[in-house]
Amino acid sequence: MNVNQQPHMASPYGQPQPGYQGYPQPGYGGDNVPSGYPAQYAPYNGPGSAYQQGPPQGYSPYASFPSKTLTTNLVSDLSSSSPLDLGMRGPPTSGAPPVSGAQNYSQFGQGETQNGPPPMVAPPQRPPVSQPYTPAAVNLPGPQPTYGQQYGAPPVSMQQMTNQMASMQVGSTAPSPAGPGYAPQSFPQAPPVSQPPFSTAQVQPGPTQSYGRPLPSTQPSFPRPPLPTSQPSAFPAGPPPTSTPSQLPGVIQPQPPVSQPPPYHSGPPPTSTGFPPRPPFHGMQGLPMTSQGPPMASQGPPMASQGPPMASQGPPMGSQGPPMAQANHILPTQPGMPPGPINTSLSGPPPQPGMQGYPAQQNGAFGQVRGPQPGYTGPYPGQQNYGAPSTAPAPAPAAPKRLDPDSIPSPIQVIEDDKANKGSEPFTTGVRGQAPPLVTTKFQVKDQGNASPRYIRCTSYNMPCNSDMAKQSQVPLAAVIKPLAPLPPDETPPYLVDHGESGPIRCNRCKAYMCPYMQFIEGGRRFQCGFCSCVTEVPPHYFQHLDHTGKRVDCYDRPELSMGSYEFMTTVDYCKNNKFPQPPAFIFLIDVSYNAVKNGMVGIVCQELKTLLDYLPRENPDVESNIRVGFVTYNKVLHFYNVKASLAQPQMMVVSDVADMFVPLLDGFLVNVSESRVVIESLLDQIPEMFADTRETETVFGPVIQAGLEALKAADCAGKLFVFHSSLPIAEAPGKLKNREDKKLVGTDKEKSLFQPQVSFYNTLAKECVAQGCCVDLFLFPNQYVDVATLGVVPTSTGGSIYKYTYFQAPSDQERFLNDLRRDVQKQMGFDAVMRVRTSTGIRVTDFFGSFFMSNTTDVELAGLDCDKTVTVEFKHDDKLSEETGALMQCAVLYTSCSGQRRLRIHNMAVNCCSQLADLYRNCETDTIINYFAKYAYRSILSSPTKNVRDSLMNQCAQILACYRKNCASPSSAGQLILPECMKLLPVYLNCVLKSDVLQPGADVSLDDRAYLRQLVSTMDVAESHVFFYPRLLPLQKLDVESMTLPMAVRDSEERLSRGGVYLLENGLNIFLWVGVSAQQELLQNIFGTPAFSQIDSNMTSLPALDNPFSKSLREIIESVRAQRSRYMKLMVVKQEDKLELIFKHFLVEDKNNNGGASYVDFLCHMHKEIRQLLS
Ligand SMILES: [Zn+2]
């Protein structure tokens, strides 16, 4: 399986084009988009976007915050010394006695703060960065059973479930008119340079110089933004309140009219006759509809035919327990048979006659074709011909002993139900413990006191009151936090709050920041902390009277008193070394060895940078970016470039002593783009020429990062390195690696070593990078094993990203690479960041997942934190929680903005606490649980055999479901599988995680790909992990070009594919266009410009721009799907029955796969067995 859109089995796609010379000009040259860049890769709007924002609904919450407390003098309080530290630690120094939990904060001492106005804590020194963050050994709770993950024969139990079914209708993703890339800049012609007068001297580092614009010591390095205190902070973009910072100009996200599905009826249990009609587009022509009732039933045999009438399958759903927690019953019994042990029915499927019952040519009717298609190997033998018209109304007794896929929980149904239920109303965050809509639902958020689900999603919005309950249920208590998440344009970015020269107001003891959970008392003179209960005096300048309800009268004028998310301006106390930071720098380090030159990468990068440097991140789109840039090329040696504006030509300095890296020049290495534009362009023109004939094949890697790090140190700033690298670094140098690829270790106890770095050098280097705020993004262009597990150590410890373009070929891959690069360079990010999550008494954060470094147990250090990155945190009890107060968390991220401002972003979240297990189960979010489980499992394989990891994960899920069954579901036959409503998709999604390439690889999955995916998943948000594990599959023959809405997705199974159809499948990394052999000629003509299936070129990576509405719509859909993801997805055309189809089928995750991964149906039966064992 190829995870990287590039074949490592060289053949099927991406072959070098014969006769290809060099690389073509990037394709964005022609079309000017006046407003600038983006369109198709929507940098600020991408990843969070399984949601598409709905039309603005008139919400403009604090459009006019009065400008209170506006700040004043930034530099007036430079006296106290404070390192880079959130200042959160310190022993209690005031008020109430310590409560449990507080002692955790004392490790850095220094809580000298007294009650009263100058409460700024000035913790002394940054702790030594000495302890590498060691991921915990695998310790999945619960016993580790020894059953194997073998699912022999397909199950045969006839099970039925009563499941809620609502009518489905599509109304989600809007195709966004894709803008044509960004406008080319016309640069002044660089002087022709044929003989670069490079000096190739080795220059010793001179005295440290400051680059850019050294600031007078009496002034802050940046002006305070000219904003009233309560303006939206500029983070995603610019200070002006009217700008919609999370959007780049030119990114169009049209809000098409969304046809709302009929109201969802959650009340009564569905009955076989109670289905609302499906939308008309299922085109049931030719089906014996009348006998089936509503169209829904035509997707398969009517439910009733599979067993007893649904109403009689179990207790009415409402009686299963609390109203929200409707159980999903799956009866293992066949009609007329007594319930029996499920294992008796797991004995293999009877052969099913009628496999060929597939009706030919039902273009446009995916619902009809359920059986295996001629010429296909079904997911497993004996597959029943479900839903074929001939059998549709078949009576139950004829049904086979096999679980009907339509009777088990359908992800599509759940997704569509959620859209119908929650997609129309804005989600307000003011109600504690309210689970948000799913990530697949488009909704608008109104911040009314808790962080938007775009920033924080929890596994459960009802936390168990005590640890016994938590242990019993085994439901993980975790939050997925995306601190700098981009917002849709109709939502307000966090406001920027300035509490003046004394800094943000905080609890004296636990150092929590002022937030809606602080209770003002004594007429407003003091406040009691919601986290630790300590009472703190209100500084005089912050005093305000209370109203009759005890609220401050200015409550709604202040974001920090009324909103879930906001930012604080910080003081110099929050800055490293007690001085305001310099603006950050970007350093581009380009491999110019033979492979990198030959595959076109060097030329493409240099060409692209000439334009891209005009789009460096900035807070205000009208102002030039403050970010300085520098350039290095390398193979076995490093070449630094002096691009000072005053030079006529760039100068090169070679450092061949890579053992002890230093930066040979200080002045002229990091420069301002506009000032040095001519020199930079000249350099970028010359680099490909200079190395065009290189014969050097060896590279170094460690010294490259060291060079960038040293340059940032010399400039005394944070920044990001963009490393473009092609091969295993075997040249003699620190960090040299050997090829240790050994596939024989896969499946053994030593497999874990393949995911661990082969040398410790990079761990040490990563630590140094983090200390400097040096984030590393790595772009890999390998033709063979490069040891991603080792090369990835620095990126994944510094908040960076890894991109991988295996067998890079310019013609077919440069579009993907360039889009990734553009997005990566432009995206909003914070530098030199530290994140701390505080919790209320009774729980605390015990574990962290993501790309970062930790030198102690509480502070997540991120050299860089971009808008795509998430940190997943896990909570554990250390005391009882109270239903009355709930549980609170506050995530504070201190970071340097791209303009050099030091800011704090605060996200607050309150969830309910419950003393009944049923309440826990009714308010969970499975997508978030899966995000947590995937990260947990993917980290665990570093320390445990993969099989053990899979087994314990499966066991934990079985325990979760068994606990529900035992404690929450009403008594029923032991043979019934009863799933909590909120978790009914847990089995199908869990199976997707278990059989993913990381945990259960096929023979064709490379070790590098596994290491790459492992690292990639560790920073995914919930929307990304959802589509990654359960890809979106859209039947394009259902596309209504008039409506602008996407067709409703179908389940990821081959039996859902119609030979007459064309389908789009995407998982956040890949897009496939699957074409059925019998696809209608008109459809093919519209898409490909040819009516003949045989003439479709499966090597194409983009669709022809044809002048018909269908083609236009489809291309818009593809662009809008791409714009939603943080990585550009290359299009791959897959013709049915073509050899490429094997790759495509790997993503049909409900089916059995070649790696031994179970089908959904089989896995569900297996889970049921596990649960029954736990219950007996
Ligand atoms: Zn406190």
Image (cartoon, helix red, strand yellow):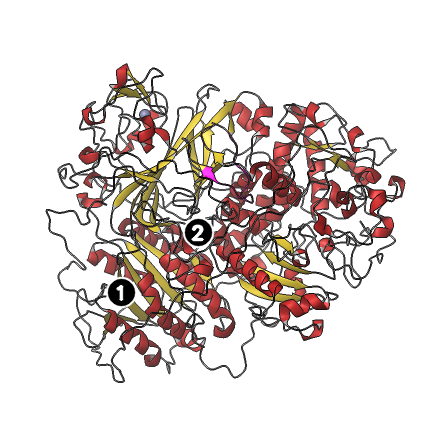
Measured as percent of width and height from the top left, residue 219 is found at: 13, 47
Regarding mark 2 in the picture, which secondary structure is present there? Answer: helix
Mark sitting earlier along the chain (2/1): 2
Queried on whether the Cβ of the residue with tag 2 lies below 8 angstroms from ligand 1, the answer reads no
What kind of secondary structure does the magenta stretch mostly adopt? Answer: loop
Q: Which mark is residue 630?
A: 1
Query: Is residue 859 at least partly visible in the picture?
Result: no
User: Which marked residue is nearer to the observer: mark 2 or mark 1?
Assistant: 2
Residues in magenta, as a range: 434-445
Residue at x-position 60% and y-position 34%: 143
Measured as percent of width and height from the top left, residue 1052 is found at: 66, 52
Tell me where residue 16 sits by quadrant: bottom right
Residue at x-position 38% and y-position 56%: 249
**Left or right of 701: which side holds 262?**
right
Q: Amino acid at mark 2?
A: Asn
Q: Amino acid at mark 1?
A: Gly
Tell me where residue 1141 sits by quadrant: bottom right
Q: Which residue is mark 2?
A: 45
